[in-house]
Amino acid sequence: MRTPIAAMSGVTEVVLDHPDTTSAIKPHLLRSRRIISQMEDLVEILLALARAPDTLINNNENIDVRAEIPAIVADHEYLCRGKDLLLAVEIESPIPVVAPLHIVRVAIGNLVRNAIENCDRGVIRIYSEHPGTITIDDPGYGMSPVEISRIYTQMAKSGQYISGGIGIDLIIRICTHFGWKLNFESVAGKGTKAILSFY
């Protein structure tokens, strides 16, 4: 799948940069580029999940998650358009992780996307309360204890998409594969915290 996706990506970039491309067409091309990027993410995740964890060691990198957050936020800020919503990064200390960089970016990016999609206004805070963790705290719709339980049940059954993007269920599989943990704290009508622990 990598080859046709790469071809679509290349063609999209060529058309975006072409002098005959009008301003009316560019938003559609930019949307196509974002969708192609999501397809690339999905392929990388499926490839990672298809390999045994010990075979992925050659793809691991020494990553400071704190240094990656600004780019991840910038990639998702377009989702805030039309909303009275801001993303605030409040991480002061390094968060070292040894893992494939692309997988770390996809996991965090999907949690940021979900937070934005479940909010209309306010500030989504991205911070670290404990070493090796990152919290995405949104002031959105929130979930009741029953809804949270339902999400965990659906994720345990696997094969079901819980929300937009690549799906929280796949993020849970990534966490299981790499020994990470993902937990939710939520109150209906008051927002949700997604807490990703790398160790």
Image (spheres, grey):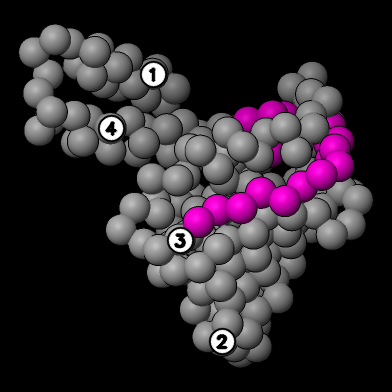
- What type is the residue that disc 3 sits on? Leu
Give how far across and how far down residue 157 sits, in percent: 60, 69
Residue assigned mark 1: 6
Marks 3 and 1, the one that precedes in the sequence: 1
Residue assigned mark 2: 188
Q: Is residue 169 visible?
A: no
Marks 1 and 4, the one that precedes in the sequence: 1
- What type is the residue that disc 2 sits on? Ala
Q: Around disc 3, counting alpha carbons within 10 Å, would you say few (fewer than 14), some (14 to 19), or many (20 or more)?
A: some
Mark on residue 62?
Answer: none
Residue 66 inside the magenta-drawn segment: no
Q: What element carries label 3?
A: strand
Mark on residue 85?
Answer: 3
How far is disc 2 from disc 3 in space, using C-alphas?
19 Å
Marks 2 and 3, the one that precedes in the sequence: 3
How far is disc 3 from disc 1 in space, using C-alphas?
33 Å
Specify the segment rendered in magenta: 86-104
Residue drawn at 37 percent across, 24 percent down: 5
Residue drawn at 84 percent across, 32 percent down: 98
Q: Which of marks 3 and 1 is in front?
A: 3
